[in-house]
């Protein structure tokens, strides 16, 4: 039986078989990818260039934009190339890289969203102690912990997954390489080790979810006790974009791994596209809609760009 060392490439699941639909998908993917690059790039530039945005909240937002750029760049360019060149192939090394970076970046993003929930909790519920609880070192360490936890998780999963012998072919039932699909190709009982790792990761993810939920329960209790309507509005404007991003991220991942989606490749394909591609493209819009400071920074950035071109 062939093992993983004899597999030189994998075959990804195509969105369509007809050439016209493949080109249509390429155009759609290209539009979404450019929108994600533009939106996240503008947030990165605005936060980096405007000194008024050099605060913990916007520092976390800058990191989120970086992670979103990485997430969508891990999966979508290969899908676009396959649609354009009418192929399904991805090299063994390319598949391993997709698994590594998808686990790394999605794990780091979820950890960062947890840290952002804590930032909002401290800002609203412990506002008098915000400076002491979240100084420069504190939020830098939190961001580093988010990136580091994602990296460690990715190293463990990739090393364990690609050490398994593969004897069930090389066809991956997904438009990018992900661990559950690679495990289906294994013919060794050692895949149980990866299942244990996945269970541990899910337990940690659930712990983060509980922490985020608890933080927002405390936040909403504090906001509802505020006597000032303006204060409540400001607090909700600070929290709702983050809550929307977290809800979008968690809900699409949960739906992607429901038993119904696993048994239906076409539904799994669509939902996986939603959780891996849509949030990185939509997050900049969510954060800029109700954030007056970010809007002002973006308009200022546009003004400087116009003056520079003149």
Image: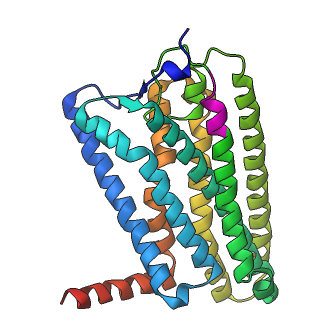
Residue at the far top in the pictured view: 1
**The N terminus lies in which quarter of the figure?**
top right
Residue 117 against residue 85 in the figure, above or below: below
Residue 115 falls in which quadrant of the image? bottom right
In percent of the image, x 66 and y 38: which residue is there?
157
Q: Where's the C terminus, which quadrant?
A: bottom left
Q: How many marks?
A: 0
**In the rendered structure, which segment of residues is drawn in magenta?**
157-164
Q: Is residue 160 magenta?
A: yes
Would you place residue 131 above or below residue 29 in this image?
below
Across and down, in percent, residue 51 comes to 52, 90
Q: Main secondary structure of the magenta part?
A: helix
Q: Nearer the viewer, residue 263 or 303?
A: 303
Q: Which quadrant of the view contains residue 243?
A: bottom right
The answer, for residue 174, to whether it is visible in the render is: yes
Would residue 18 be counted in the magenta stretch? no
234 up-or-down from 60: above or below: below
In the image, is residue 116 above or below residue 6? Answer: below
Residue situated furthest front in the rendering: 5
Residue 9 image offset from top left, x and y in percent = 42, 26
Q: x, y percentage for residue 61?
A: 56, 71
Residue 130: % across, % down: 76, 84
Q: Please name the residue shown 48% across and 56% down the image.
A: 70
In the picture, measured across the screen, residue 230 lies left or right of residue 131, that is left
- Which residue lies at the image location 45% right of the left edge and 48% below the top edge? 74
Q: Is residue 223 visible?
A: no
The coloring applied to the image is rainbow
At a point 79% along the width and 79% down the height, the residue shown is 125
């Amino acid at each position: 039986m062939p093992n993983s060392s004899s597999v030189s490439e994998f075959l990804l699941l195509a969105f369509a078989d007809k050439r016209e639909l493949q080109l249509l998908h390429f155009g759609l993917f290209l539009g979404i990818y450019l929108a994600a690059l533009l939106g996240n790039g503008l947030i990165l530039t605005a936060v980096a260039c405007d000194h008024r945005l050099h605060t913990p909240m916007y520092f976390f937002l800058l990191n989120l934009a970086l992670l979103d750029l990485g997430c969508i760049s891990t999966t979508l360019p290969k899908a676009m190339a396959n649609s354009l060149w009418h192929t399904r192939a991805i090299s063994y090394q390319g598949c391993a890289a997709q698994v590594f970076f998808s686990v790394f970046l999605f794990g780091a993003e979820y950890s960062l969203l947890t840290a952002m929930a804590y930032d909002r909790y401290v800002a609203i519920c412990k506002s008098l102690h915000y400076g002491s609880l979240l100084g420069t070192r504190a939020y830098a360490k939190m961001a580093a912990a988010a990136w580091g936890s994602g990296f460690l998780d990715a190293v463990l999963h990739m090393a364990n997954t690609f050490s398994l012998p593969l004897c069930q072919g090389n066809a991956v039932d997904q438009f990018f390489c992900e661990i559950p699909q690679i495990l289906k190709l294994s013919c060794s009982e050692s895949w149980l080790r990866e299942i244990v790792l996945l269970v541990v990761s899910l337990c940690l993810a659930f712990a983060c979810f509980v922490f985020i939920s608890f933080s927002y329960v405390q936040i909403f209790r504090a906001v509802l006790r505020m006597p000032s309507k303006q204060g409540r509005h400001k607090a909700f404007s600070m929290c709702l974009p983050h809550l929307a991003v977290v809800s979008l991220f968690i809900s699409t991942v949960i739906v992607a791994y429901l038993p119904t989606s696993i048994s239906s490749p076409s539904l799994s394909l669509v939902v996986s596209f939603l959780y891996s591609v849509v949030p990185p493209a939509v997050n900049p819009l969510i954060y800029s809609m109700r954030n007056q400071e970010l809007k002002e920074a973006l308009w200022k950035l546009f003004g400087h760009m116009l003056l520079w071109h003149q």
